[in-house]
Image: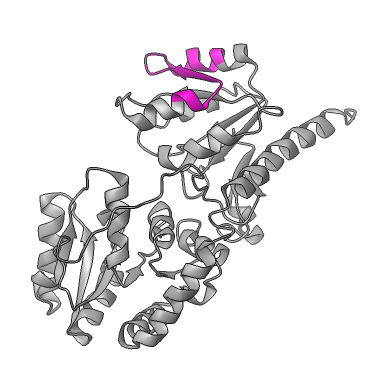
Amino acid sequence: MAHLIAGLIEDHDRSKFEVYAISASPDDGSALRRRLERGVDRFIDVRSMGDDAVAVLIRELEIDIAVDLNGHTKGGRLGIFARRPAPIQATYLGFSGTTGCTFFDYVLVDPVVVPADQQPFYTETLLPFGECFLPSDAHREPVVERTTRQACGLPEKALVFCSFNSPHKITAAIFDVWMKLLREIPDSVLWLVEGSQGTTENLKREAAERGVDESRLVFAAKRPSMSDHLARYRVADLFLDTFPYNAATTASDALSMGLPVLTLSGKSYASRMAGSLLRAIGLDEMITTTVADYEALARTLATEPDRLAAVRARLDRNIRGSRLFDADRHRKSLEAAYIAMVNQRQAASAIPSA
């Protein structure tokens, strides 16, 4: 979350907005934490405060719009919002779906990740904005690091399928597809993120049970810096997304490094995230809607080098000036959404009661 919003917070138009951060997160002493503290007009650490006290504080600060960035995730403080401390309350980015809470007025989305026909399933009012729900950081340092397959523990001549999603997103159904691809394409490997020891051993065992030698699963260890991590994407061939919980930040990272992403889209927010990114960067053909199509396209791209190279070349062209990585365009669209919230509330307040 911090990596996603740092640039957005810094670039908000201060002639129209005053930006406060109400933080309940541990201070890890990182450069990113310091950057967030500097990027807002006022940073308030509320870890030691209860929900009632934080709600009172928000009222005293006369916050016009309170934006939740957590939802039902670890460390979230929905109890603060349940006390209605701000006249307008919205949820954004941190939780992939409806909170089911009636104390949020809006959920900030885009038209692809949550189409208008999903409104009946949301307690919040859908407020679509911009081209893609996911922000990018205009101030991220260019990735100049270089790495090799050998340095990453990958075979030099292999076709490298990559899926750096968190291991908990891997379902048996998608893993079945991945293992089938490995069986059919002998010179291929699957590059995954190293999880806990138990997770790694479980995946190796499941691969063996599906007739795939565990050595063809390569696990990427955590790197000391974000640039080191991002540089690794350049040595992979194709990113295979998970379903029904798609990649979001991970897909953005892969695309920014020129690695094509293949996704399977469903009907839920969580299952449409990578599709939103691909639509914004002009790679609609990498969005599939059935397991069979997902498997077939992965096989085609893996066995037809010219076709995969054409997708990669188009991605390289589209990165420059793409809607996906246009941080300023995203900021302006989000700010317009905030202003629309205020205007709508003011218009509603002006209506005489019956």
Q: Residue at x 47, y 24 (%)?
A: 38
Taking the spot 31% from the left edge, 46% from the top edge, the residue there is: 226
Q: Is residue 211 magenta?
A: no
Image height check: is 47 above or below 342? Answer: above
Where residue 150 appears, as percent x and y from the top left, is 14, 65
> Residue 255 sits in which quadrant?
bottom left
Residue 288 visible to the viewer = no
Residue 183 in view here: yes
The colour scheme of the drawn protein is one colour
In this picture, is 248 found above or below 316? above
Which image quadrant: the C terminus? top right
Q: Is residue 49 magenta?
A: yes
| 23 left or right of 8 in image | left
**Residue 101: x and y, percent?**
54, 38
Q: What residue lies at 33% left-to-right and 23% top-to-bottom? A: 27
Question: Taking 172 as reference, is 290 left or right?
Answer: right
> In the image, residue 125 lies at what x, y percent?
65, 45
Q: Quadrant of the N terminus?
A: top left
Per the rendered image, the range of residues in magenta is: 37-57
The image shows residue 333 at horizontal and vertical percentages of: 67, 46
Up-down relation of residue 249 to residue 246 (above or below): above
